[in-house]
Amino acid sequence: MEFSMILKPEAVRVLSAVSSKKRLFHELGMIAEVSYAVNHTEAIDALQERESLGPTGVGHGVALPHARLGCVEEVVGAMVLLEKPIEFDAVDRQPVDLIFALFAPNDAGVEHLKALALVSRTLRDPSLCAKLRSNHDPATLYTILTEAQSVQAA
């Protein structure tokens, strides 16, 4: 699985006006609607429902919210860089500023897990995260993510 299979360039954003997890989920829902024709209300509700099971802040300023939706046919993602980190109940209690959300079909099974593993493994790299944080152009962020994977594979 590759980033280019789950992430469209238009689903990468830099946001400045997000001050809460609820607002972030609203933005992710809107990105999913515009990029993948997902019902934004369904996406927001699914993200909040999954988050109620346990926070998806994985530490070091990174969060990986994810949800299953009946309206998607394949695993898709949205990547957000926040200009100002927000509280996220992360495992290390640090605020988050790098968020990669995944939306998977209800019956995705292994594909959902593969996508989650890909994103998690990639965003565990401190130098890659530093590179993402130092760039505020969505096209550059997309390139960093898609090239990082090809470098890892080499």
Image (cartoon, helix red, strand yellow):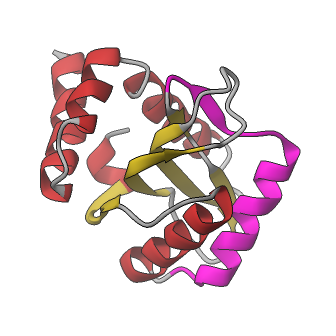
Q: Looking at the image, can residue 12 be seen?
A: yes
92 to the left or right of 74: right
Q: Quadrant of residue 134?
A: top left
Of all residues, the one furthest to the right in this rendering is 53
Q: Looking at the image, can residue 70 be seen?
A: no
Counting labels gives: 0
97 to the left or right of 144: right
> Which quadrant: the N terminus?
top left
Q: Quadrant of residue 130?
A: top left
Residue 14 lies in the magenta-colored region: no
Q: Residue at x 54, y 53 (%)?
A: 102
81 to the left or right of 117: left
Q: Residue at x 21, y 40 (%)?
A: 146
> Which quadrant: the C terminus?
top left
Figure check: 110 above or below 30: above
Q: Main secondary structure of the magenta part?
A: helix
Figure check: 27 above or below 65: below
Instruction: Provide the residue span drawn in magenta.
Output: 38-60
Q: Is residue 85 or residue 98 the one in the foreground?
A: 85
Q: Is residue 48 or residue 108 the one in the foreground?
A: 48
Looking at the picture, how far across and down is residue 133, in whole percent? Answer: 27, 36
Looking at the picture, how far across and down is residue 115, in whole percent? Answer: 49, 40
